Image (cartoon, rainbow, N blue to C red):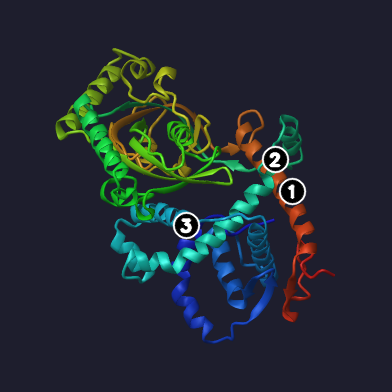
Amino acid sequence: MKVIFKNTLLLFALLATFCSGFAQQSKKRIDGVVAIVGEHIILDSDIDIGFVEAKAVGYDVSNASRCEILGTLLENKLFMHQAVQDSIVVTKEEVNYEFDSQLDRMVESAGSLSNVLDFYKKKSVDEVRESLSTLIENNMLASRMQQKIVEHVQITPEEVRQYYMTIPKEQLPMIGEEVELAEIVVKPEITKEQRQAVIDKLNEIRQDVMEGDSFQNKVYMYTEDPGSISTGGFYVVDKKSQFAKEFKDTAFSLKVGEISEPFLTEFGYHIILLEDIKDNKLQVRHILMAPKPTEAAIEAAKEKIAKIRSEIVNNQISFGDAARKYSDAEDSKNSGGIYLNPMTRDTRFEVNRIQDKYLYSMVSGLGLNEISQPVFVNDMYTRQNFYRMVQVTKKIDEHLADYDHDYLKIKDNALNVKQSKIIGEWITKKIKDTYVQLSPDYKDCTFKSNWSKK
């Protein structure tokens, strides 16, 4: 089973690319309804868009049929329909958050906000948001429905082994060149006075709200969280949410209407207002503020990491010992700087798939045991600035996937196959209980699922 609409970023890219061409094409052909799934319709033009989407994610569509694309669209409409039946809700704030998160990445990729607006032929961010909000919401619903279907699916080592043994050798995936890395991070110093100034300001804001000011208005004035500023600092939090532990612990300690005292995460200092609790999910607003290093502190960090590199290069200290002694990266310093891939939590990085532009610039071209020059990093995740240098501790040439050396990747593939099978079985069952109507033009299609209900 192929689920084309895997993420909102894909929708952003394809809509902009496809928009002008499709506008002209649609004038040449009447755009009729080709299918109905529950309360959702699929237009003939949606199939054309589906071809573009499939191509955008790397599928070879040269031999793909309209029936195949329609089958994928039918699956996604079924997910959306069932999400509503199961009371899965996507809030306006969550849609805005998703939009803002993707917009940040697009601005970084395009170089500026104006380039993004030009790309979409829009005059403002709000116009782009308005045109894409419904699509984002629908795809979030479909995605959450799929997650719900497979949320308890696990896979055993024996299942992984059996999966690997069933793959013909000529069909084993090729793994690109990989490296294992160690890192040393030096952060510009933040003084106690700078930290206390942020805490004092958050306490002042907290007191103002307790005396009647609007928390939401304070968010617009002060927060430094770009992902939630447009929603007034709003988040939905549950036990499985991917928030910092300190954030979740604080949120779940509050009573409805209560505002936390300032607390620290890797992102900076926060205060949280718990607005409501629905279905064991917390509806919160927060304000984030982080102390900023001075230019002198930044320069001092640059000099410090340059000196550390000099000591390593001159064999005065090993890279691992230097990481333990000097690095400010709490999650890697005690292991001698061993840097885990944040996407896989494995030690390996496939060089050509490194998405962090700073890391890629450091790793690209480095030989075994070589050390990069220090690079000033603006971390997209924590929004913090620091200097980092890395050492290539191991290189693995391009190779066919091997059970012993690539177990985690094989495990992920095996789990995906198992989840896909379970989702396929779910689709077969739900089709029987859902209103489905196909246009006569597509009644003779051969689908993977029984959409024709023959």
What residue sits right under mark 2 in the picture?
A: 153
Q: Position of residue 45 (x, y in %)?
A: 58, 76
Which comes before the other along the chain, label 2 or label 3?
A: 3
Estimate the spatial distance between the alpha carbons at disc 3 and disc 1, rounded to whole Å. Answer: 28 Å
- Write down the quadrant of residue 440 in the picture: bottom right
Q: Nearer the viewer, mark 3 or mark 1?
A: 3
Residues at marks 3 and 1 touching, judged by CB atoms closer than 8 Å: no
Image: 384 above or below 216: above
Considering the image in quadrants, where does the N terminus appear? Answer: bottom right
Dot 1: within a 10 Å radius of its alpha carbon, few (fewer than 14), some, or many (20 or more) residues? some
Of the image marks 3 and 1, the number of the one nearer the N terminus: 3
Depth check: 239 or 304 in front?
239
Q: CA distance from mark 2 to mark 3?
A: 27 Å
Residue 422 x, y percent position in the rendering: 74, 48
Residue occupying image coordinates x 72% and y 32%: 156
Which mark, by number, is residue 95?
3
Tag on residue 422?
Answer: 1
Element at label 1? helix
Q: Residue furthest front?
A: 211
Q: Secondary structure at mark 3?
A: helix
The amino acid beneath tag 1 is Ile
